[in-house]
Amino acid sequence: MEERKLYVCIKCGRTFSRPEMEILPGIRCPYCNFKIIMKVRSPAVKRIPAL
């Protein structure tokens, strides 16, 4: 079961996956070529019991 990690560009706001990002050399947005991207968090909430 392979997870698909999504990233979002800080400048243009587009969401893309790792294979799309590897089109350009280095870690950059494939749409606007901006260097600062962040990983999208999953919507699932982890519940940890208190000790």
Image (cartoon, rainbow, N blue to C red):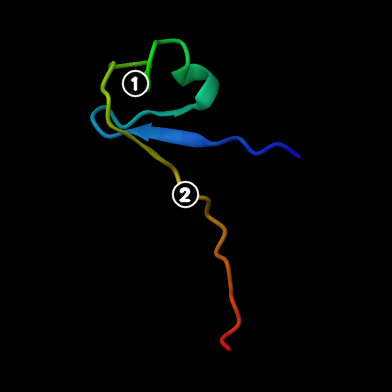
Q: Nearer the viewer, residue 8 or 28?
A: 28
Above or below 29: residue 37:
below
Disc ID at residue 41: 2
Badge 1 is on which residue? 28
Amino acid type, callout 1: Arg
Is 10 positioned to the left or the right of 41 in the image? left
Amino acid type, callout 2: Arg
Above or below 14: residue 41:
below
Mark 1–mark 2 CB contact (< 8 Å): no
Above or below 38: residue 35:
above
Q: Position of residue 31 (x, y in %)?
A: 34, 16
Is 20 positioned to the left or the right of 12 in the image? right
Res 36 → quadrant: top left
Residue at 60% across, 35% down: 4
State the quadrant of the N terminus. top right
Residue at 45% across, 20% down: 21
